[in-house]
Image (tube, grey):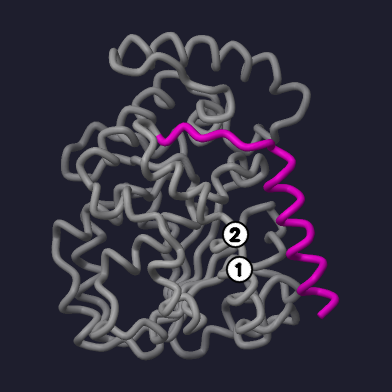
């Protein structure tokens, strides 16, 4: 069953139920120190691999391994600790999804001052967002698309990147069942989210060495989903996103970028306790009422669109 055929509807309940039973049994066999996994937690991994239990198990084990091996990032899920960065309007999750149901994320690299914030702190913002949106059912099935605005990229930014960090960043890029590879050249997918597209805008020539450093660790499917739009991005972003989704600063008709950045900063701050629980939990298996994510997403969109 392909990812495009999976919508999380009634027809998927039976295979999802069977998958949960099988994945839980096999995961508890592999992880002897763990006594229980919740349905909500395991569901993220099943949808990320289109209900393929074998691939879901590998992803779950990679996630646990990544958390253990990258504590400087995985245990640093505190929005208040990077509030200064967030208040620069560095990052936003747009209130409206795209036409396929994917979440749309924006990162404004020029708002990051490398003299004030280390690269791993900046990356932790992405991880916090990923942990939150991975709890949304629609995001589990439809994934995300990210826009990186590289206006203001400087040598100071580039000097913070190295192959070790590049591997850790690329390891959280998941694309679904068809992307799995046993080629050890690639970093292993470690996060239960499908990345449907990566769009670079305002990218300068001297950003390319960093992209070249990250690219070898990415599966072919992710490489093909990287789109470079340059300085005239407003002419081409519209090929991928409808005007109602994007802020005016990116050629759209949606709420302004500063407002959506502030709204998402507020969402992160409201999730501080939840993120801290995930960071300190042995497996990251923290459950919340499913409707909570849906309500916060709906209210956020309504408030921004009305404002």
Where residue 186 appears, as percent x and y from the top left, is: 22, 45
Q: Is residue 183 left or right of residue 112?
A: left
Q: Residue at x 57, y 79 (%)?
A: 236
Q: Residue at x 22, y 60 (%)?
A: 166
Indicate whether residue 302 is drawn in magenta.
Answer: yes
Graded by Cα atoms within 10 Å as few (under 14), some (14 to 19) or many (20 or more), the crowding at tag 2 reads: few
Which corner quadrant holds the N terminus? top right
180 or 289: nearer the viewer: 289
| Numbered label attached to residue 279 | none
State which region is magenta.
Answer: 284-307
Report the predominant secondary structure element of the magenta stretch. helix
Callout 1: SS: helix
Name the residue tied to disc 2. 270
Q: Is residue 186 left or right of residue 78?
A: left
Name the residue tied to disc 1. 266
Q: Is residue 31 left or right of residue 16?
A: left
Where residue 58 appears, as percent x and y from the top left, is: 34, 26
302 or 153: nearer the viewer: 302
């Amino acid at each position: 069953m392909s990812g495009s055929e999976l919508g999380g509807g009634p027809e998927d309940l039976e295979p999802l139920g069977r998958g949960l039973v099988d994945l839980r049994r096999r995961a508890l066999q592999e992880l002897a120190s763990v006594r229980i996994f919740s349905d909500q937690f395991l569901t993220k991994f099943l949808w990320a691999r289109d209900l393929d239990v074998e691939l879901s198990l590998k992803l779950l084990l990679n996630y646990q391994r990544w958390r253990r091996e990258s504590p400087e990032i995985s245990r640093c899920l505190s929005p208040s600790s990077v509030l200064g960065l967030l208040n620069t309007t560095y990052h936003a999750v747009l209130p409206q999804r795209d036409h396929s149901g994917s979440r749309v994320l924006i990162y404004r690299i020029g708002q990051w001052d490398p003299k004030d914030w280390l690269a791993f702190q900046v990356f932790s913002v992405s991880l916090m967002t990923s942990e939150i949106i991975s709890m949304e059912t629609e995001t589990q099935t439809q994934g995300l698309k990210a826009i990186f605005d590289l206006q203001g990229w400087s040598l100071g930014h580039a000097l913070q990147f190295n192959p070790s960090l590049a591997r850790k960043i690329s390891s959280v890029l998941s694309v679904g069942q068809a992307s799995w590879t046993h080629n050890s050249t690639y970093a292993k997918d470690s996060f239960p989210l499908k990345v449907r597209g990566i769009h670079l805008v305002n990218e300068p020539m001297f950003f390319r060495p960093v992209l070249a450093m990250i690219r070898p660790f990415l599966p072919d499917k992710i490489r093909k989903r990287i789109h470079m739009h340059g300085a005239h991005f407003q002419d081409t972003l519209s090929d991928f996103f409808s005007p109602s989704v994007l802020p005016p600063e990116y050629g759209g008709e949606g709420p302004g970028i500063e407002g959506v950045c502030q709204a998402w900063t507020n969402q992160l701050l409201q999730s501080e306790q939840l993120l801290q629980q995930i960071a300190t939990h042995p497996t990251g298996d923290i459950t919340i009422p499913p409707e909570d994510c849906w309500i916060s997403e709906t209210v956020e969109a309504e408030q921004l669109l009305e404002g």
